Image: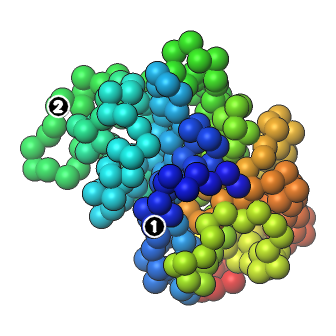
Amino acid sequence: MYLNKEYNVEDHIIELSPNKAFSLQNIVKLDGRLSAYPPDEDGYVPLNCYLVKEENGAFLFDTGYVFHQDNILSQLSSVLDKNTPLSIIPLRINEFMSVGNAKAISHNFNVISYYSPHPEAPDWFDFTDKERDLSLKKIPTNLLRGTVTCEVGEGSGRNIQVISAPLRLINTSWIYDEQTKILFSSDMFNYGIARSDQEEWIIAQNDPNITKGLVRSFLLNTRYWWLEGAKTRLLRDNIRKVYDSYDIDMIAPGYGKIFQGKDLVKQQFELLDDILNDLDVSNTEAQYVPRNFMR
């Protein structure tokens, strides 16, 4: 991990690549309310917003919960000049974690565009006041369809690829940064949990706590209960296509610890593939699962 000590760890800013990519983190204790985690999980996780930037342009992936608004505005101010052209990509436009602070950031920074699978992104951002804030409509929305290539800063030559997540419950994007070789994976690969709020938030070597049983439980007890007994072959093919298409050095999820290193990246993809194979209808019978029944 590259960690520039100029950014105070207490502020929960991790520089993932020198002046190129940052994780803006807010640490929370799990208590059953966060749908990305099983209801009985009680560890600590970072909620991650990510900034990638060049001298004349930047992209922000997710904007965080409104509860953390002051923290996120402060974090962003410490790593980005307010005059730098900034584009916002909510990785899950249907969720508050992605859009909660889009409005506040748009009013405090030089936001020049939104990227969204919906043609009017501001319609999803303006929910904190009684009166509509029509000023957000002046910022154009770029429609996301299929794989979209974006340049980070005009003329920089640094591209990011925005792709439709191959495994998702709602409309979700993954993003690959060609220069830093980081895959931003939204709500997938989010099972890196800490036992205290003082741990390292990057996993750089094999973690014996991350087992097949743990990851299977994460899938079935959160947003992917429907995988058991489903036809998973096409899902596996599409996930494998992502791994084969991009040279990934780091997985940066929207929730949880970050995975660093090619071997760890490969391990996470292989683990997911193995579990999806086990859950396929050819190996597992579909069953009715009562609400809050833990598997």
Above or below, 239 relative to 83: below
Image point (69%, 45%), residue name: 183
Above or below, 118 relative to 154: below
The three-letter amino acid code for the residue at tag 2 is Leu
Q: Which of 102 and 165 is in front in this view?
A: 102
Image point (14%, 40%), residue name: 132
Q: Residue 37 carries which label?
A: none
In the picture, measured across the screen, residue 89 lies left or right of residue 224, that is left
Q: Is mark 2 on a helix, strand or loop?
A: helix
Q: Which mark is residue 134?
A: 2
Residue 173 pos. (x, y %): 58, 42
Q: Dot 2, how many residues are within 10 Å of its Cα: few (below 14), some (14-19), or many (20+)?
A: few
Q: Quadrant of residue 180?
A: top right
Name the quadrant of the C terminus.
Answer: bottom right
Q: Dot 1, how many residues are within 10 Å of its Cα: few (below 14), some (14-19), or many (20+)?
A: few
Q: Is mark 1 on a helix, strand or loop?
A: helix
Name the quadrant of the N terminus.
Answer: bottom right
Q: Nearer the viewer, residue 256 or 57?
A: 57
Residue 189 in sight:
no
Q: Nearer the viewer, residue 143 or 233?
A: 143
Residue 293 pos. (x, y %): 60, 86
Residue 223 pos. (x, y %): 58, 65
Residue indicated by mark 1? 10
Residue 17 pos. (x, y %): 64, 43
Marks 2 and 1, how far apart in space? 36 Å
Q: Which colour scheme is used?
A: rainbow
Q: Earlier in the sequence, mark 2 or mark 1?
A: 1
Image point (26%, 45%), residue name: 104
Above or below, 116 relative to 94: above
Q: In which quarter of the image is residue 270?
A: bottom right
The residue sitting at the left extreme is: 131
